[in-house]
Image (spheres, rainbow, N blue to C red):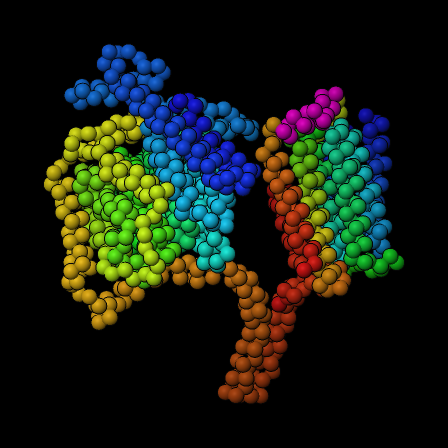
């Protein structure tokens, strides 16, 4: 338990720092790389929570596909490679709002779940294993699954239709 | 492990994402911030899945990942279109609906 | 055979695939596959019908010997007189679970009972004849193979709809026939009106389909199942709350209105005549448009309880049907296109069926569906024959027809039989079924609808006489050389004419034959309906009204009596004519008002809101205040109030400026306010709840 806790805190601090850098970085490519750091961190957190399938999917899909997509986005919008000011004029109100939101959320969470513990044991491992997730996905949730596949197709076509030059 | 350590990490990531969405000018950066928020939600879902010992939360996390992929695709296409029409990905200039 | 009835829809479905794959390479370009598959389906449907009749007869015969007839006999009740013991004959069902989600199972299956068997027979027969007819009618068409593939697909979908044992499968079939209808109406899509008509038909029926879908969902949550038999049983036994049934039946009625061309969604059906004539005969007369009536008959317990049909009061279903009868028949008078006359006639006759269901005349309505399929398909195919060989591919009765009686005797005589059957002249099929609807309406004390039905019968007879006159009598007005159609066209006409004469006799109450009722009416999970005794007076009245209609019309057209040219002289009559000619302005209402106000109007409205309401409010307040100020400046003491007024104007202007800042047009600013509100509201919630 202690080992997981240590791992959690290390990863959490890295993630938090990287997330802050994502929204403050003055270089687009750096921001994308920090985002990848956060995503890998989240994937590690899933592994700590014994959700191996979700963790691996997160790694492949986000870090592999989405991040590359972002780099492509940076390329096609021809962003300058040198640092630039990417903040708009409502920076301070935005900071205030997000800090307020964070405060409310943290207060709420401590109030509601202050003493709850997650037990990391073998039965949790069984829940997160690929066969269990697969069974659940293709039995109980097969309709949402199909709907999501349709949504992906629609998004694909939509993206092509929007971005097409005509 | 405390449930809250995951939830507070998630809350922090979410609020960082909120800040990014509100304060960034570049469309691609705004999309990245949205991804931060979605990831925060995912951590939340998986933590609760482990807490209540039900696979449903993980399934929902998978759906969120999938839909996030779709969202990035469409979002980047929109940013590309903005870039093409306004010669800049700055969202500040997308204000034709102003009063 | 009954348990294997799934073969009947399967065969045309296979032929659809086969025609698509290899149709173009076959000597007859795929037609032989379609004709063969549908013919085989027809044979199977006949076998199924024969077996079902055998089963019903067997059950009634053997129950007196107290012998159970398989598991079909659930229990016999002693009927009146003991001669025809009422025995419950359960439908033959067979199915399997397609997929399941949580606790909900979705089945695929067939449920075969009298109604299904009747529909199977009608659909396969008409479809077979249309397939044969089209070999000649569509000869040389540029998309001949494509046409046959879709005819097969349509037949398969319609049969799928008919055999469905659950509402989901029914919905699938329902949408598939809608799709086929769309594609076939737009068969000659190169011409814009045809493509428009196809889109209109598709979208208009879709309006009703929304209702159908909601109805199915409501029924699912009310009954906990998609199984039609189970839903019916629960509805009959009162296990579903009345309010739910009212909601469900009202929503389902929306589906019927859309599909069966009932008022006010009937406008698509006349436009659907843009498709090839065989398509009109098959889809828009005999089969698809009666899918709505079939739905009403299939889920009848739901409607019966939902609309309290046994109460004898006016209910929505009967009202819609009655309105449609009159509206459709009135419009049929002003059409010059023979197919449009028939289309409006179909609308009107469908109105009879829906009204029949609404007044508790289940058997009569279904019987009318049965007979109408034959004579209306006959009339459409006859009209097609006229245009094919008589009027050079035109459907305009006034410009290109007339006097065709001499040139096309077979077409003429079969068309006459169809018209007489439609007009309800004894002994043709339409008389028996229409009379049965009217008799039941009278018996169940729906006097208003009885009158509506009689008026409708009068109008039907009159407009059909006009149609026959314009097409077959008088001088030939066309420019071609009319001749009789080839055999592939006339033989289906003769077969259908035979059915138009004879089909009525299976339920000729005057002759005390009520086989149709015995064979078709469900005995399980079905409300107890009363059946009318044959009344000579009622039947004679209906017949007299129809004859009067023919007579008046005959006098007007053949003998040239009556107020000819009244529309040119009398402004009131002209106004009425214009009103009819513009189809009650419903199309204008739908296209210009409803669609026009939705399409683009949202964009315009939000732009307008931005430009006028917000901007205008801001500027208006400022300028208004300034004007008030100026007014005060002029009228009141200039110097004393001057400062106050200016101050007011400036401060309002500043308020406006502040509001303007809110309405920046920048999404991120809106998002900032959104998140700020969320944070503040959750903070408030948190503080107050602790």
Q: Main secondary structure of the magenta part?
A: helix
Q: Is residue A59 visible?
A: yes
Residue C529 painted magenta:
no
Q: Position of residue B43 (x, y in %)?
A: 73, 37
Task: In this rendered view, identify the residue nearer to me: C299 or C339.
Answer: C339
Q: Is residue C445 visible?
A: no
What residue lies at 47% left-to-right and 49% top-to-bottom? C141
The quarter of the rendered structure image containing the C terminus of chain B is bottom right
Task: In this rendered view, identify the residue nearer to me: C371 or B56.
Answer: C371
Residue A27's place in the image compared with C576, above or below, is above
Q: Position of residue C244 (x, y in %)?
A: 39, 37
Task: In this rendered view, identify the residue nearer to me: C183 or C534.
Answer: C183
Task: In this rendered view, identify the residue nearer to me: C652 or C251.
Answer: C251
Q: Is residue C518 left or right of residue A142?
A: left
What residue lies at 24% left-to-right and 41% top-to-bottom? C430
| Residue range of the region highlighted in magenta in the rendering | A122-138
Residue C308's place in the image compared with A87, above or below, is above
């Amino acid at each position: 338990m202690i080992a997981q806790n240590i791992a959690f805190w290390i990863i959490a601090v890295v993630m938090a720092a990287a997330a802050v850098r994502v929204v403050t970085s003055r270089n687009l490519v750096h921001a994308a790389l920090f985002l990848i750091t956060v995503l890998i961190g989240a994937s590690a957190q899933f592994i700590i929570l014994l959700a191996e399938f979700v963790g691996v999917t997160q790694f492949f899909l986000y870090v592999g596909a989405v991040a590359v997509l972002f780099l492509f986005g940076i390329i096609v919008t021809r962003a300058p490679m040198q640092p630039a000011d990417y903040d708009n004029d409502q920076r301070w109100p935005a900071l205030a709002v997000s800090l307020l939101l964070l405060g409310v959320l943290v207060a709420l969470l401590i109030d509601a779940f202050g003493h709850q513990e997650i037990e990391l044991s073998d039965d949790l491992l069984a829940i997160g294993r690929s066969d269990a997730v697969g069974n659940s996905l293709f039995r109980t949730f097969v309709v949402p699954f199909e709907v999501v596949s349709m949504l992906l197709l629609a998004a694909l076509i939509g993206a092509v239709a929007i971005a097409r030059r005509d | 492990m405390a449930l809250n350590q995951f939830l507070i990490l998630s809350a922090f990531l979410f609020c960082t994402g909120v800040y990014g969405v509100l304060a960034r000018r570049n469309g691609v950066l705004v999309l990245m911030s949205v991804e931060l928020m979605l990831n925060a939600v995912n951590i939340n879902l998986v933590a609760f899945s482990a807490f209540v010992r039900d696979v449903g939360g993980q399934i929902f996390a998978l759906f969120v990942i999938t839909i996030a992929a779709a969202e990035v695709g469409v979002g980047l296409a929109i940013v590309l279109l903005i870039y093409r029409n306004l010669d800049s990905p700055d969202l500040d200039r997308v204000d034709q609906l102003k009063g | 055979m009954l348990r294997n009835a799934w073969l009947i829809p399967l065969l045309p479905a296979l032929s659809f695939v086969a025609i698509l794959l290899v149709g173009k390479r076959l000597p007859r370009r795929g037609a032989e596959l379609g004709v063969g598959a549908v013919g085989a389906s027809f044979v199977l449907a006949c076998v199924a019908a024969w077996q079902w009749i055998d089963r019903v007869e067997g059950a009634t015969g053997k129950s007196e010997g107290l012998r159970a007839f398989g598991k079909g006999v659930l229990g016999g009740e002693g009927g009146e007189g003991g001669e025809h013991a009422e025995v419950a004959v359960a439908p033959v069902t067979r199915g399997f679970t397609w997929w399941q989600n949580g606790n909900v199972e979705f089945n695929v299956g067939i449920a075969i009972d009298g109604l299904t068997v009747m529909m199977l027979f009608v659909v396969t027969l008409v479809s077979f004849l249309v397939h044969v007819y089209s070999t000649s009618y569509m000869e040389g068409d540029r998309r001949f193979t494509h046409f046959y593939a879709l005819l097969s697909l349509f037949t398969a979908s319609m049969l799928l709809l008919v055999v469905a044992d659950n509402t989901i499968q029914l919905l699938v079939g329902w949408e598939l026939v809608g799709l086929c209808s769309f594609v076939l109406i737009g068969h000659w899509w190169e011409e814009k009106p045809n493509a428009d008509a196809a889109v209109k038909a598709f979208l208009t029926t879709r309006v009703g389909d929304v209702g159908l879908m909601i109805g199915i969902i409501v029924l699912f949550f009310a009954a906990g199942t998609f199984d039609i038999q189970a839903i019916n049983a629960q509805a009959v036994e009162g296990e579903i709350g009345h309010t739910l049934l009212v909601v469900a039946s009202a929503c389902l009625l929306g589906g019927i209105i859309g599909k069966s061309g009932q008022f006010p969604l009937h406008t698509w059906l006349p436009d659907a005549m843009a498709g090839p004539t065989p398509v009109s005969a098959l889809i828009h007369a005999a089969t698809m448009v009666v899918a709505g009536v079939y739905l009403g008959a299939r889920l009848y317990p739901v409607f019966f309880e939902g609309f309290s049909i046994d109460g004898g009061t006016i209910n929505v279903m009967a009202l819609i049907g009655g309105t449609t009868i009159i509206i459709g028949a009135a419009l049929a008078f002003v059409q010059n296109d023979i197919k449009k006359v028939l289309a409006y006639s179909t609308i009107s006759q469908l109105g009879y069926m829906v009204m029949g269901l609404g007044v508790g005349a289940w058997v009569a309505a279904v019987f009318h569906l049965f007979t109408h399929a034959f004579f209306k398909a006959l009339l459409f195919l006859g009209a097609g024959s006229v245009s094919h060989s008589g009027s050079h591919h035109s459907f305009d009765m006034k410009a290109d027809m007339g006097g065709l009686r001499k040139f096309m005797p077979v077409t003429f005589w079969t068309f006459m039989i169809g018209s007489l059957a439609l007009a309800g002249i004894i002994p043709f099929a339409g008389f028996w079924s229409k009379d049965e609807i009217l008799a039941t309406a009278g018996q169940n004390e729906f006097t208003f609808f009885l009158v509506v039905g009689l008026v409708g019968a009068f109008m039907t007879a009159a407009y059909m006489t006009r149609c026959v006159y314009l097409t077959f009598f008088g001088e030939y007005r066309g420019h071609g050389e009319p001749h009789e159609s080839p055999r592939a066209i006339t033989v289906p006409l003769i077969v259908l004419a035979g059915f138009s004469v004879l089909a009525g006799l299976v339920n000729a109450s005057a002759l005390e034959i009520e086989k149709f009722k015995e064979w078709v009416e469900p005995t399980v999970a079905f409300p107890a309906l009363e059946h009318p005794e044959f009344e000579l007076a009622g039947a004679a009245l209906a017949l007299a009204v129809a004859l009067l209609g023919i007579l008046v019309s005959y006098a007007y057209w053949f003998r040239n009596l009556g107020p000819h040219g009244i529309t040119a002289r009398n402004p009131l009559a002209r106004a009425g004519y214009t009103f009819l000619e513009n189809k009650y302005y419903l199309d204008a209402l739908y296209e210009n008002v409803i669609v026009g106000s939705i399409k683009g109007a949202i964009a315009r409205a939000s732009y307008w809101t931005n430009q006028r309401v917000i901007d205008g409010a801001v500027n208006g307040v400022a300028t208004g205040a300034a004007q008030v100020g100026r007014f005060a400046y002029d009228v009141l003491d200039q110097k004393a109030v001057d400062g106050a007024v200016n101050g007011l104007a400036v401060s309002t202007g500043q308020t406006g400026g502040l509001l303007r800042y809110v309405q920046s047009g920048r999404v991120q600013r809106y998002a900032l306010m959104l998140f700020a509100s969320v944070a503040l509201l959750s903070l408030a919630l948190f503080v107050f709840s602790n």
